[in-house]
Image: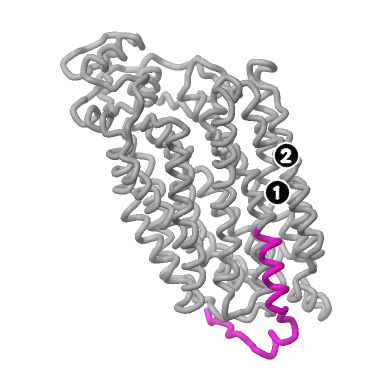
Amino acid sequence: MSVQQFSPAAAAVSQPSEQDTKRTVFAAALGTVFEWYDFFIYGSLAAFFSTLFFPKGNETAALLAALATFGAGFVLRPFGAIVFGRLGDMVGRKKTFLVTMLVMGIATAAIGLLPTYETIGWAAPAMLVGLRLLQGLAVGGEFGGAVTYVAEHSDPNRRGLTTSWIQITATLGLFLSLVVIVLCRSSMSAEAFASWGWRVPFIGSIALLLLSLYIRLKLHESPVFKEMKAQGKGSRNPIAETFGDRSNLRLVLVAIFGVVAGQAVVWYTGHFYSLYFMTTTLKMSHEQANTYLLVALALGTPFFLVFGWLSDRIGRKWIVVTGCVLSAVLIMPLFQALATYGNPALTEFRARTSVVLSGNNCSEDQSIVGQLFRPQATTDCTKAKALLTANAIPYVVNADGTSLRIRIGDKELTRFDDAAILGALTEKGMPSAKAPVQPNAPTVVATLFGLVFLATMVYGPLGALLVELFPVRIRYSGVSVALQLGNGWIGGFAPFVATAVVIATGNIFGGLWYTVIVAAMTAVIGALFLPETRGRDLSK
């Protein structure tokens, strides 16, 4: 595939002033930060939501349900990309992402008004899923539109740096959501936050929505889009052209599996699964985990801009490919370090304690995932797995066709009894759940910084690369579809898949193989099939 070199003559027709570019980047980036805040505020509270919107009695199943609901927001993202991508390529970039912002803001505020499971039963999680789907629909059209809009306003020699301001918005949105949560939790009692305080971050997003709409209404349409429409070169059916044309479909597939898939799993593993891992596996308090991640994000976020700038100098492709290779190699040891220094006492206990589950029920396919909405319909072996997982205790399954046996060191239990199991673990030295976790804070922050740094490497140049990869006629559609299929269906479920694998295997690091495999696959496909796009003329 040949690279279309930048044409100065074409750019002269539509190149905006530097002041206009700065205004455009600020307005588009600020609005996108607020949209990511809306989308991620649920993810930041997912472990907390499992106690509000799902039935009690099986905490592990409730957590998986909460994570699946978080993932539900990703299900409709590709469909949002199709719907809003078509609008963006036909009626304009600006109008389209104004609509996506409005949908997102309304859905987020509505979550803050929802009654809980205790009040209305299963209608509560049903409505929660519905609103998450609306959020996913809106995000599906927002991000691709914002990065396309900014790229088409940019100096071609600084396009990587300029679009990296949009790449930075996802992390800033998460950062903002964590800050708001920390402020809310610290300004009220735990009881007040559980009762009504959790609603404040959602309802308060209305103010962000109004500010964002006000700023974006002042923007002008993309000069590249206006030039295309003036010349009558627009597509009548951009979605059909994206998927129906073999060369365009090839671009979509290369973009998904040679760029976005790896970026997605690395970003969500480092930003979200790390948060779940600290709170649910390492037993850190929410305040500890949020604070450590906030510091790591503050330290790491500028590197989005660094790698965007670097891609303008040396190219985009090999920065992303190298980031995927490093992620495949380093993700596992980074999480092992996070466990070691995040809860030293628990790590020491896990190292000297072995638990073996035996029995015919353990040999059957008793997937907790399949029982999410029937949390009481579990076998004794499944209950034992859930209890051990909830306490971050590794186990192995020895299905020998007999009745359930639980061996903890040299002690054996012949039936499921949560008090007896916890008592046996406590005798072996398991740290008390009431004892405060004492992490090695500097090392934990350094480890989290490493995870964030890997995300910046694969994500910083991504916006410019994708915009340059697709022709102007289908650019909004192509960029959005590639981003949302990769992020929505491959990356967005990374926390859920990782948690489900941990439950199935008893290995707290087992779920990370999903990220390792996808990142490695992306590196190989990207190295073989992804073209270098730096310098392409966006008017073509």
Residue found 75% across the figure and 71% down from its top: 222
Residue found 45% across the figure and 56% down from its top: 300
Give the residue number, with chain letter if any, for mark 2. Answer: 107
Disc assigned to residue 444:
none
Is mark 2 in CB contact (under 8 Å) with mark 1? Answer: yes
Residue found 64% across the figure and 64% down from its top: 147
Comparing marks 2 and 1, which lies closer to the viewer?
Answer: 2
Q: Is residue 246 visible?
A: no
**Residue 343 falls left or right of residue 407:** right
Question: Which of the two residues, 172 or 262, is positioned nearer the viewer here?
Answer: 172
Give the residue number, with chain letter if any, for mark 1. Answer: 138
Q: Which residues are magenta?
A: 1-29
Q: Magenta part mainly helix, strand or loop?
A: helix
Quarter location, residue 52? top right
**Residue 201, image x, y percentages:** 65, 36
* Relative vertical location of residue 341 with respect to residue 309 in this rendering, above or below: above
Within 10 angstroms of label 2, few (less than 14), some, or many (20 or more) residues? many
Quarter location, residue 538? bottom right
Rounded to the nearest whole Å, what is the CA distance between mark 2 and mark 1? Answer: 9 Å
Question: Which of the two residues, 441 or 416, is positioned nearer the viewer here?
Answer: 441
Residue 10 within the magenta-colored segment of the rendering: yes
**Residue 136, image x, y percentages:** 65, 45
Residue 443 within the magenta-colored segment of the rendering: no
Label 2 element class: helix
**Residue 127 falls left or right of residue 434:** right
Label 1 element class: helix
